[in-house]
Image: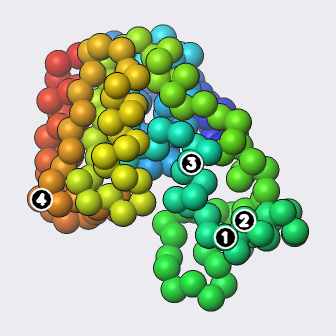
């Protein structure tokens, strides 16, 4: 993930160099919300931050993302597959190397501190979360981050939405919340 945070900086450097703007809003969804959280407080060019489906404590989120068999593989082989071989559940992560994840990726779940980053972030924050998020509990993670965040901040829970909801009514409410937030910056 720390490499993804570096990629975030490179993308923002490129955008600000080639497309100068007065407002720059960083939006991160799911794993991208982790990257956005960890990076945003460091960069004063960011006018606002939108976290969509974020986790709060990565050490606990490791249990959301990795099955027992995958954790065993990390410790024995040093890597695992993105989706356990016998699993029918598909992940949407874009992982190179034929779906192999190195143990270093898993290890970072226990070293990166999202709550600390959110406490250090001092500009407007919008957290959006699906009410029926099966991957990240709505009653825990987004609420914890919201409590830690500085003002101005807002938490929007999309009724009926899951973690990967693509239903038009859920996307419409998400986009409306983002639009309202950005317009007020």
What secondary structure is marked by label 2?
Answer: helix
- Whether label 1 touches label 3, CB < 8 Å: no
Residue at the (42%, 60%) spot, across then down: 135
Q: Is residue 176 above or below residue 37?
A: below
Residue at the (79%, 70%) spot, across then down: 73
What secondary structure is marked by label 1?
Answer: helix
Q: How crowded is the residue under tag 1: few (<14 C-alpha within 10 Å), some, or many (20+)?
A: few
State the residue position of label 2. Answer: 71
State the residue position of label 1. Answer: 68
What secondary structure is marked by label 3?
Answer: helix
Q: How crowded is the residue under tag 3: few (<14 C-alpha within 10 Å), some, or many (20+)?
A: few
| Image mark for residue 60 | 3
Q: Quadrant of residue 48?
A: top left
Q: How crowded is the residue under tag 4: few (<14 C-alpha within 10 Å), some, or many (20+)?
A: some
Q: Earlier in the sequence, mark 3 or mark 2?
A: 3
Cα separation, mark 3 vs mark 2, equals: 13 Å
Q: Position of residue 145 (x, y in %)?
A: 40, 31
Foreground disc of the pair 3, 4: 3
Q: Quadrant of residue 100?
A: bottom right
Q: Position of residue 106 (x, y in %)?
A: 71, 53
Q: Is residue 95 left or right of residue 166?
A: right
Q: Which image quadrant: the N terminus? A: top right
Q: Is residue 64 left or right of residue 132?
A: right
Q: Position of residue 159 (x, y in %)?
A: 15, 54
State the residue position of label 4. Answer: 169
Q: Earlier in the sequence, mark 1 or mark 3?
A: 3
Cα separation, mark 2 vs mark 1, equals: 5 Å
Q: Earlier in the sequence, mark 3 or mark 4?
A: 3
Residue situated in front as seen by the camera: 29 or 135: 135
Residue 50 in view, yes or no? no
Residue situated in front as seen by the camera: 108 or 92: 108
Residue 89 in view, yes or no? yes
């Amino acid at each position: 993930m720390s490499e993804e945070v570096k990629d975030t900086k490179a993308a923002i450097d490129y955008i600000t160099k080639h497309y100068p703007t007065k407002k720059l809003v960083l939006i991160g969804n799911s794993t991208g919300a982790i990257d956005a959280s960890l990076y945003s407080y460091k960069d004063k060019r960011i006018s606002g931050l939108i976290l969509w489906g974020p986790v709060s404590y990565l050490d606990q989120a490791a249990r959301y993302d990795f099955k027992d068999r995958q954790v065993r593989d990390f410790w024995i082989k040093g890597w695992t597959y993105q989706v356990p071989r016998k699993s029918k559940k598909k992940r949407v992560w874009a992982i190179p190397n034929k779906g192999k994840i190195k143990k270093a990726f898993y290890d970072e779940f226990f070293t990166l501190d999202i709550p600390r980053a959110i406490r250090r972030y001092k500009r407007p924050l919008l957290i959006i979360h699906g009410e029926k998020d099966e991957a990240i509990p709505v009653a825990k993670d987004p609420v914890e981050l919201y409590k830690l965040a500085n003002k101005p901040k807002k938490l929007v829970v999309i009724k009926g939405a899951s973690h990967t909801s693509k239903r038009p009514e859920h996307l419409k409410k998400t986009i409306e919340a983002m639009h309202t937030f950005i317009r007020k910056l």
